[in-house]
Image (spheres, grey):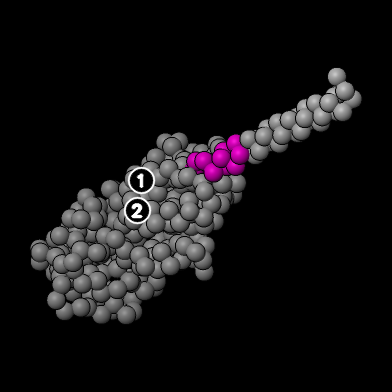
Amino acid sequence: MSERFRRCQLEGKTVKHRVSWIAVVTLALGISSSAHAQTRITLLTPDPIKADVDKLVQQFEAKTGDKVQVSYGTGVGTRRTVAEGGALDVTLLFAPFDEALKTGNIDKKTQTVVARLRLAIAVKKGAPQPDISTAAAVKMTLLNAKSIASVDPMQGSVGGAALLALDKMGITDKVKAKIKWFSGGGGVQDAVANGEIEIALGPYLSDMRNPGLDVVGALPPEAATPVDITGWLSTNVQDPKAAQALLDYLKSRDAAPVWEAAKVFPVR
């Protein structure tokens, strides 16, 4: 065998060796990239903001390549889930949530307000719209109303927020006899849309989208304190960096247009 032939064989083996290592490195990088792209984040959120969270999750997934698995529950139900130890990687709750925080399965240091809900008043479509421009005007409107509908505080956060607003205006005892509590926002909408109840007191968002309603508008903060939509990471989050990125995105400038379109107030 000639010296030239042996050199060619050695050079061929060297090239094959290098190609083999390049393939290994490329495969490793591909696996790493794929693993990152398939990061899965779990999210727990109240269902009154389901449509809006769904849009934000889609935007986040498109931007990052991470996947988000969302679980929904009522405002009361999500707080109960957390209180029973069921917080997910990222959890959103409606205030108040003191009881949920006591279990220690969410990291209090990560607490972040992502947006704020406002209570609103709605009437049957075409009915005269009451004055809600000031706290005094809202108070008079509710005192003069023949009937008021809202969500049962034991079943939905909206009812709790409504009670807090009535307490803030000092009229709870004066109007409670004419409030009819419903198990969900759908019942509130239908009762006002069909004329059974005069005024709906509910969130300035999805629960007020019934075509048979005219939404008068959001109540001024002096009448009803805005409800914080607050998020945390759990204490056993699998990928803290990815979960924090989702939480940050929910309050970002990119998220603001989605919140605004839903009549939810972004955090500036």
Label 2: state its secondary structure. helix
* Residue 46 placement, left or right of 66: left
Q: Position of residue 17 (x, y in %)?
A: 75, 29
Residue 31 covered by magenta stretch: yes
Q: Position of residue 64 (x, y in %)?
A: 53, 51
Q: Position of residue 98 (x, y in %)?
A: 46, 48
**Taken as a whole, is the magenta stretch helix, strand or loop?**
helix
Residue tagged 1: 72
Disc 2 or 1, which lies upstream in sequence?
2
Residue 110 covered by magenta stretch: no
- Residue type, mark 2 in image: Lys
Residue tagged 2: 50
Residue located at (30% from left, 51% from top): 156
User: Is 40 located above or below residue 157 in the figure?
Assistant: above
Label 1: state its secondary structure. strand
- Residue type, mark 1 in image: Tyr
Instruction: Kindly give the residue lying farthest to the top in the view shown.
Output: 1
Residue 32 in sight from this viewpoint: no
Q: Nearer the viewer, residue 114 or 240?
A: 240
Residue located at (40% from left, 68% from top): 260
Q: Which residues are magenta?
A: 30-41
Q: Nearer the viewer, residue 196 or 24?
A: 24
